[in-house]
Image: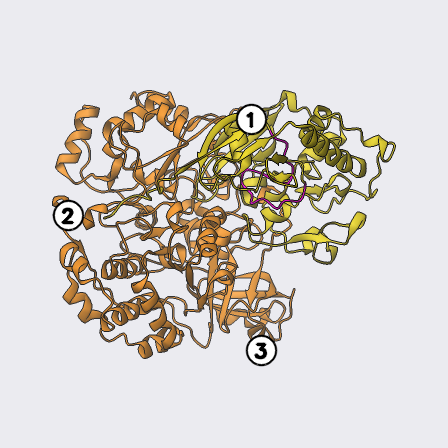
Chain colours: A yellow, B orange
């Protein structure tokens, strides 16, 4: 029998999230169940197009019967689980994780992280007044994107996007240990000499603006970056025939950034160098 | 193929394929996001064979790289076909029900033993056998190709030789298996679908078919010319004969993109009038008598484009056009009006509805559905139809849904038309690089750190010629000479040189390329010229021998 890809009939799993019953497909995560229950969950290292790497621990929830808090982004649902997302223990844990991140990293452009830090009353200053960073110069090595590792929370999203989750280029990984750990090319080679192919898929998933398109960086330097004045238009790339969907971010009738929708099954948020950066002839 | 001009499969299917033959395609660089889908297939355990003269960045992901000699694809395809038959791995039920001409095909491939193929193609005999068995025994298998198959003097025969393999094994017309030509431009599929080919109306209705023609004549209230027109290559021949004196070029740069560019430019120079409508001042536009500045279709106007998986998607204006640049549709309608004709609605949505009314395969794609669904794949005949992920499912119906069986094609191997000689001992092949696009009109405008404009040579060839990395060399073919710098590339076999077509301002590569073209498709043999490479300084003395 010839059929189109029949999605196998999935059996539903029912769990309780903050006392509310939700049914999600088998194989779904607790985070999926929280979404289904309408409960918002902070997640920094997890993105909708990425495989969870379980490093940020911000998304932890309390699972009845479990000694430790569990990461909701990667823990699969099991029938009759009871989850608490807003218990004192969860709130306390999330608050401390956010405080640790914000005390050692410049989170000034990490809007979502800052909102959650405020939500949980995080106070990074109680560890290091004013915060501490590696105090590294911004790496501006070409005209396409910059790397500002003082803003990096080591969430691994860029590493995963460059590697198994999308691009399979493996140009970057984590080098060093402890406070000295950072994302690096091979032997910290300048980007143009590295294995990087400039797809910008790492930039697209960065939650803190440590990776930034050069256009945005330049406008910010000139104090002219105005997201509130920008329009975002979905269209189709002008290059090869794959049909990648683009989101053109336009300010003052100029394209200032190009992204791709996560929810379109051709691109899943990814682009190549031409689609990502090749628009400035417009 | 089999009557419809489109790839048979959806991108999602490659993620579920078991065996992939990537043939004459460097999709990793030319179709990078399609390659992401392919990588998902590999991660899932698919086995990939990459058939390419170069050890490309795509080949690096293959289980087996079959480094084929340029222009010997039919010999390999026929050899794979022969081995499938010999080993009893063909799908005899499928062949009996759904195909025609099997006996003649089987006889035609019989001489292509693995050893004979190895001698012609430069691929070990056991690799030929392995590919045949892997492809034939896979549950789901796809053949993907691009210009490595079609930029040859026998492009269509090359494609038919691949189609034969799918017919032998039943790897077409069902989910996961298929024949996929990856499209090189964002709307080359859509252009063909809309009838921007010399012998078709929109929806692939033949202009010489009286029934189809009557439909269009009724809609437009006038008689339409039943004679197929000229494709680009025939136009250039007509220019040479003096039969074509005026040319209106929209969004194409033939002064740079045609093979044997010096000859093509001479034909364009000789026209009575050349009108060019483009977004930028291309070399062709510089030659024009009249230039009509156009807006950028995908970022400055509303409309649709159709992708390699036959998916029609909306483009939308994000910025307003500069200066006096105008939308293509307005320019065309104004021109028509100046000639005393009304072309119909200028509103892109109304124009789209006109397409839907005349092309049944687009009938169900309302503007609203295209907006909501993120695109629909043709054929989509009515508004309740979900679109078609793969083509030719009828091949698996007992009655073939009343259609004629799909024919095998007997195709003969014929190597590149330009043989290597003492004077031109190296094979030059041209292609694409990740960061650039065609003649560089668009892609030349951003600061790519990856950009390279030059000639790639195998280190052994370079050493034999006394050439080192970075040296300036003179590359000569029977049609002309071009200077460029050299990069050593062990990804190339000995005897093969490679360059891209992306930087005609720096390297006028199509001065070198071979204009011999396929009589069925009109495509020139960009992939195989015979050249000589020598240090740039030394070449002055050799000038006399180039002719």
Give the vertical position of B319 relative to A238 (above or below).
above
Q: Mark 2 highlights which residue?
A: B400
**Lower position in the chain sequence, tag 2 or tag 3:** 2
Residue A264 relative to residue B410: left or right: right
Q: Which mark is residue B547?
A: none
Q: Given the image, what chain letter belongs to the residue carrying mark 2?
A: B
**Mark 2 to mark 3: distance in Å?**
59 Å
Q: What stretch of residues is rendered in magenta?
A: A41-56
Give the vertical position of B517 relative to A127 (above or below).
below
Q: Residue at x 18, y 23 (%)?
A: B221
Specify the quadrant that holds the C terminus of chain A. top right
Dot in front, 3 or 1? 1
Q: Which type of secondary structure does the marked residue at label 2 adopt?
A: helix
Residue A150 relative to residue B517: left or right: right
Seen as rendered, the residue at the extreme right is A129
Q: Are marks 2 and 3 in contact (CB under 8 Å)?
A: no
Q: Given the image, what chain letter belongs to the residue carrying mark 1?
A: A
Q: Mark 3 highlights which residue?
A: B464
Marks 2 and 1: same chain? no
Q: Quadrant of residue B53?
A: bottom left
Camera-side residue of A219 and A10: A10
Q: Residue at x 67, y 44 (%)?
A: A55
Question: Can you see residue A30?
Answer: yes
Q: Which percent across, then down, holds residue A123?
A: 80, 28
């Amino acid at each position: 029998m010839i059929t189109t890809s029949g999605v196998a009939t999935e059996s539903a799993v029912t769990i309780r999230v903050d006392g509310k019953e939700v049914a999600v497909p088998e194989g779904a995560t607790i985070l999926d169940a929280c979404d289904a229950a309408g409960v918002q969950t902070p997640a920094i290292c997890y993105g909708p197009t990425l495989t969870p790497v379980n490093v940020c621990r911000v998304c932890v929830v309390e699972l009845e019967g479990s000694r430790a808090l569990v990461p909701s982004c990667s823990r699969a649902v099991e029938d009759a689980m009871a989850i608490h997302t807003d218990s004192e223990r969860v709130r306390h844990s999330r608050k401390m994780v956010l405080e640790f991140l914000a005390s050692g990293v410049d989170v000034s452009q990490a809007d979502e992280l800052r909102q959650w830090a405020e939500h949980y009353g995080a106070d990074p200053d109680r560890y290091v007044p004013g915060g501490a960073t590696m105090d590294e110069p911004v790496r501006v090595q070409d005209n396409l994107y910059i790397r500002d590792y003082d803003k990096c929370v080591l969430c691994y999203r860029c590493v995963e996007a460059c590697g198994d989750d999308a691009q399979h280029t493996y140009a970057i990984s984590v080098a060093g240990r402890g406070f000295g750990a950072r994302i690096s090319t091979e032997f910290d080679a300048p980007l143009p000499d590295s294995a990087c192919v400039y797809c910008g898929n790492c930039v697209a998933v960065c939650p803190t603006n440590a990776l930034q398109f050069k256009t945005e960086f330049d406008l910010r330097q000139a104090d002219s970056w105005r997201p509130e004045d920008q329009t975002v238009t979905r269209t189709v790339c002008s290059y090869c025939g794959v049909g990648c969907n683009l989101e053109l971010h336009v300010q003052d009738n100029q394209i200032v950034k190009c992204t791709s929708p996560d929810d379109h099954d051709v691109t899943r948020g990814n682009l190549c160098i031409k689609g990502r950066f090749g628009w400035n002839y417009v | 193929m089999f009557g419809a001009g489109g790839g048979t499969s959806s991108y999602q299917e490659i993620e579920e394929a078991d065996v992939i033959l990537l043939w004459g395609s460097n999709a990793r660089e030319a179709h990078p996001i399609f390659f992401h889908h392919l990588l998902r297939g590999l991660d899932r355990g698919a086995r990939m064979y990459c058939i390419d003269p170069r050890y490309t960045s795509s080949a690096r992901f293959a289980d087996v790289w079959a480094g084929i000699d340029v222009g010997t694809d039919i010999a390999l395809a026929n050899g794979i076909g022969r081995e499938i038959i010999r080993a009893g791995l063909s799908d005899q039920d499928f062949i009996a029900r759904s195909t025609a001409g099997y006996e003649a095909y089987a006889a035609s491939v019989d001489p292509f033993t693995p050893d004979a193929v190895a001698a012609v193609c430069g691929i070990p005999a056991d690799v030929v056998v392995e590919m045949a068995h892997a492809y034939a025994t896979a549950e789901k298998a796809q053949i993907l190709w691009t210009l490595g198959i079609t930029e040859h003097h026998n492009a269509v025969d090359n494609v038919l030789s691949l189609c034969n393999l799918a017919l032998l094994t039943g790897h077409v017309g069902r989910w996961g298996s298929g024949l996929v030509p990856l499209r090189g431009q964002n709307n080359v599929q859509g252009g063909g679908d809309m009838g921007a080919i010399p012998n078709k109306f929109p929806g692939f209705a033949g202009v010489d078919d009286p029934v189809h023609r009557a439909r269009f004549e009724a809609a437009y209230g006038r008689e339409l010319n039943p004679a197929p027109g000229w494709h680009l290559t025939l136009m250039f021949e007509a220019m040479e004969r003096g039969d074509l004196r005026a040319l209106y070029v929209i969004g194409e740069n033939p002064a740079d993109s045609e093979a044997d560019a010096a000859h093509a430019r001479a034909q364009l120079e000789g026209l009575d009038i050349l009108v060019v409508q483009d977004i930028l001042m291309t070399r062709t536009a510089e030659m024009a008598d009249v230039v009509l500045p156009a807006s950028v279709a995908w970022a400055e106007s509303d409309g649709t484009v159709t992708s390699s998986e036959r998916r029609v998607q909306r483009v939308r204006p994000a910025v307003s056009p500069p200066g006096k640049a105008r939308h293509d549709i307005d320019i065309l309608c104004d021109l028509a009006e100046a000639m005393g004709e009304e072309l119909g609605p200028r509103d892109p949505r109304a124009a789209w509805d006109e397409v839907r009314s005349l092309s049944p395969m687009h009938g169900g794609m309302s503007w609203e559905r295209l907006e909501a669904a993120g695109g629909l794949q043709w054929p989509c005949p009515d508004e309740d139809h979900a679109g078609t992920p793969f083509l030719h499912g009828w091949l698996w119906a007992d009655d073939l849904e009343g259609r004629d069986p799909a024919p095998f094609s007997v195709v003969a191997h014929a190597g590149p038309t330009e043989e290597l000689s003492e004077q031109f001992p190296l094979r030059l092949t041209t292609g694409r690089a990740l960061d650039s696009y065609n003649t560089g009109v668009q892609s030349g405008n951003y600061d790519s750190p990856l950009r390279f404009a030059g000639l790639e040579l195998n280190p052994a060839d370079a050493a034999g010629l006394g050439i080192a990395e970075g040296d300036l060399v003179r590359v000569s073919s029977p049609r002309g000479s071009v200077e460029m710098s050299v990069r050593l590339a062990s990804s190339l076999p000995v005897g093969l040189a490679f360059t891209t077509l992306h930087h005609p301002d720096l390297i006028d590569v199509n001065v070198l390329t071979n204009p011999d073209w396929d009589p069925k498709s009109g495509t020139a043999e960009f992939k195989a010229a015979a050249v000589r490479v020598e240090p740039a300084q030394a070449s002055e003395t050799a000038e006399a021998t180039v002719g």
